Amino acid sequence: MARVLVGVKRVIDYAVKIRVKPDKLGVVTDGVKHGLNPFDEIAVEEAVRMKEKKIASEIIAVSCGLPQAQESLRTALAMGVDRGIHVEVPQTQYDTLQPLHVSKILAKIAQDEKIDVIIVGKQAIDDDSNQTAQMTAALLNWPQATFASEITVEGNAIVVKREIDGGLETIKVKLPAVISADLRLNEPRYATLPNIMKAKKKPIKKITAADVGVDIAPRQQVLSVEDPPTRQAGSVLPDVDTLISKLKEKGHL
Amino acid sequence: MGAGRRDVIALYKTLLHMGRDYPQGYDFFRSRLKKAFQRNSDISDPEQIQSLVKRGEFVVKEIEALYMLKKYRTLKNRYSTEENPSKS
């Protein structure tokens, strides 16, 4: 039976309209609805299904982030994860926390907890880095199966269907391995109210990055965060001649 | 009084909890929910209460499916590079 580690991140809810802060050094997070990163939800669901199929013995969820990241861990616990590890990162360092830091933390915890499978979402919907799974696999020297859309366990190996441009690729990797979940892997269950209540009794261990020997001191600085350019308003023209003259004016003809 | 009271309260709480994620807002959902429950508040026949609770549980499943689909479609549109991403 495999021991499974899932990575979860608390992000601004997918349905919220993102606004840039007036100082252009970040986005507005205060008073904004947050939630578990949707791709991480898919990763959690896959781990829980492995446990239901008796493939996994224990599922541990790890979140690196602000004290509020506990909410995301609770959601994961409500979905069926056994226990959580919260790597607390203060705001000043969280702004420049990089996927490499998270990978190092995940790799260390995976070794400490004797993990066989790490499942993470392919990317977070806030920074869209899509690096954590790949770098974690590299740091551990484990095989990786990214963008998984179907996972089947065959003894000491897993067969993964990967989403690639224009189709699917099927690969087989030996355990231990790192998997990143793509959108079509499964349909995550809803964390019901009774399960959220029960999840409050499940343990969450709080540690710091220093406890696992990872230096997360900032090495870069955010210079500017900007809105994407807005589309310019169009205009309705009375006839074809005006259209042609307008197009000529702009140099399209 | 008494028959199915706990089931009804549990259903109400579950729906209230789900309303927090409702696209048109929590207040919209809560006022509708309250009205829907109040409309049937004078019913005392246990069988009828049970069938209404069943219907409520069906609504819970429907809302769960709605949320899931909405999330899936949003993410698909946002991240897919297919030629016609609006279809799903």
Image: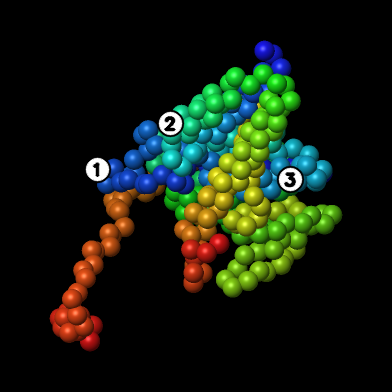
**Which quadrant of the figure has residue A54?**
top right
Task: Please give the chain letter of the residue carrying mark 3.
Answer: A
- Tell me the amino acid under the disc marked 1: Pro
- Residue located beneath label 3 in the image: A49
Instruction: Please tell me which residue lies in front, A163 or A207.
Output: A163
At 53% from the left and 49% from the top, the residue drawn is: B71
Q: Is residue B12 above or below residue B74?
A: above
- Tell me the amino acid under the disc marked 2: Asp
Q: Is residue B45 above or below residue A62?
A: above
- Toward the right, the furthest residue is A155
Q: Is residue A122 above or below residue A209?
A: below
**Which quadrant of the figure has residue B88?**
bottom right
The kind of secondary structure element at disc 2 is helix
Regarding residue A226, the answer to whether it shows in the image is yes
Of labels 3 and 1, earlier in sequence is 1
Q: Residue B27: which numbered mark, if any?
A: 2
- Toward the bottom, the furthest residue is A253
Q: Residue A142: which numbered mark, if any?
A: none
The kind of secondary structure element at disc 1 is loop
Does the CB distance between marks 3 and 2 fall below 8 Å? no
Regarding residue A204, the answer to whether it shows in the image is no
Q: Residue A22: which numbered mark, if any?
A: 1
At 28% from the left and 60% from the top, the residue drawn is: A229
Which x, y percent locates residue A191? 62, 36
**Distance CA(mark 3)–CA(mark 2):** 35 Å
Q: Is residue A217 above or below residue B74?
A: above
